[in-house]
Structure formats: structure tokens, C-alpha cells
Image (cartoon, helix red, strand yellow):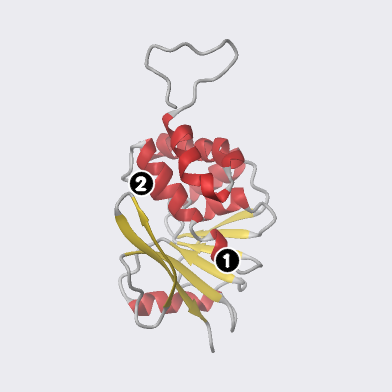
Amino acid sequence: MDRDEGSSVAPGVSRETPLGRELRGALGEFGLDQVAPRLEQHWKLLQQWNQRTNLTAIESPIEAAWLHYRDSLELLPHLPPGSLVDLGSGGGFPGIPLALCQPERPITLLESRRKKCSFLESCVARLALPNVTVRCARMEDEPPSLFAVAVTRATFSSEQDLLACLRWVPVGGELLALRAGDEPPSSATTVHRYTLRGARRHVARWVRTA
């Protein structure tokens, strides 16, 4: 139960933040309460940098808990094993929440804008994420290596752009995209449908065949 505004907090005990309280609810079914404090660290960094670099339009910690962090972690049950690249990582979604939950998985955050890359590099250092590499490059650039799975929450303008993301994985590798609405593009399959804050969303999946 939430505390009343006038309730006291025992000495030495930190009052739960709005984001922390909401993350507890958002991540409960995943059993990931233990990562909530580190997700809060990321959110604080995001807020600080957002004052000078456009990283997110979301300001409410309640909405951030669901629309950033819970949304990113909807991918967890659907990821194949192996290395992962987050295409168009921006503020670090979904790559950083995934890295915090799966510290054994090698993860690359791909971002084309230098200021956002600087933010991501700061996050990797401040959050002590040895499994994460930041690469400042475009999705269209030649991949330095291939990854078992590519993920993205970036909005690509066409189905052709999404299909082009498959160049980052080998034959048999997967692309998983977090998208709005119920139905995937015609070239993809839906592996998961869900609703967040009243909005319908889905995880679309492609497999590279050639």
C-alpha cells in the first residue's frame, strides 16, 4: 500500500521513489525487482542528459516504468541465445534494460547521432556494463561483425528499412522489433501481443533466410 503524504520514514531507510514503486509493479511478473535500482540510475542519467539532448519525450516516471522499461523487457522471453545488437538505440531502449537483466549476453548499442552515442557511453561507464559496447554508426553501414539477434524500438519508415536490418545477423539469425498496433508488416510474424497503458503493441519477428 502507498504511504500517506504525511507518513514518516524510519531513519536510514530511503523513501521509495515514484519510479521505483511503479517499476515494482511493471516488472513483477518477470521476477526482476532486483534490477529496479539500476534501471532508476539509468532514468536519472536520461533525465540529466535530456535537458540538452533530445533522448525521450516521456517525463513521467510512471509512464517511463511502463512505456520504456517494461516495454523493452517484453523481449526477454523471445530472445534466442547469443550476441545482440540494438539498432537505433537512442536513449538506450531496449538495449540497456536487456543488458542489466542479462549481464552475460554481449550487447552492442548502435546509434548514428554523436550526442546520443556520448550519452550511451556515459551510461555504460556509470552503470558498469562490461557486456555492452557502443558503436556510433548507421544501420546502413557495413556491420563489423554479425550478431545472433538484432532488436529495435526505432521507427523505421518502411518495411524495406526493417528488412534491411537483417544484414546485421547471419542466415538463421533473427530481428525482433517492438512495434505499435496489433499486426506486423507482411514480411514478419507476430510472436507476442500485449497492451501497455491502454496501447496495443506487439513483437514482430523476422528470420534471415539468405
Seen at 56% across and 72% down, the residue is 143
Place of residue 140 in the rendered image (x, y in percent of width and height, measured from the top left): 45, 73
Circle 2 residue: 56
**In the image, is residue 116 above or below residue 41?**
below
On the rendered structure, is 181 left or right of 149?
A: left
Name the residue nearer the viewer: 103 or 3.
3
- Looking at the picture, tell me which residue is in the foreground, 32 or 100: 32
Query: Which is more toward the observer, 151 or 51?
Result: 151
Name the quadrant of the C terminus.
Answer: bottom right
Write the residue at 43% across / 78% down: 189
Total number of numbered discs in the rendering? 2
What residue did someone put label 1 on? Answer: 79
Q: Position of residue 16 (x, y in %)?
A: 49, 25
Q: Residue at x 46, y 27 (%)?
A: 17
User: Percent x, y for residue 142?
Assistant: 53, 75
Amino acid type shown at disc 2 = Thr
Alpha-carbon neighbours of circle 1 within 10 Å: few (<14), some, or many (≥20)?
some
Q: How many angstroms separate mark 2 from mark 1 (CA)?
A: 25 Å
Q: Residue at x 55, y 59 (%)?
A: 76
Q: Amino acid at mark 1?
A: Leu
Q: In what element is the residue under mark 2?
A: loop
- Indicate the quadrant containing the N terminus: top left, top right, bottom left or bottom right: top left
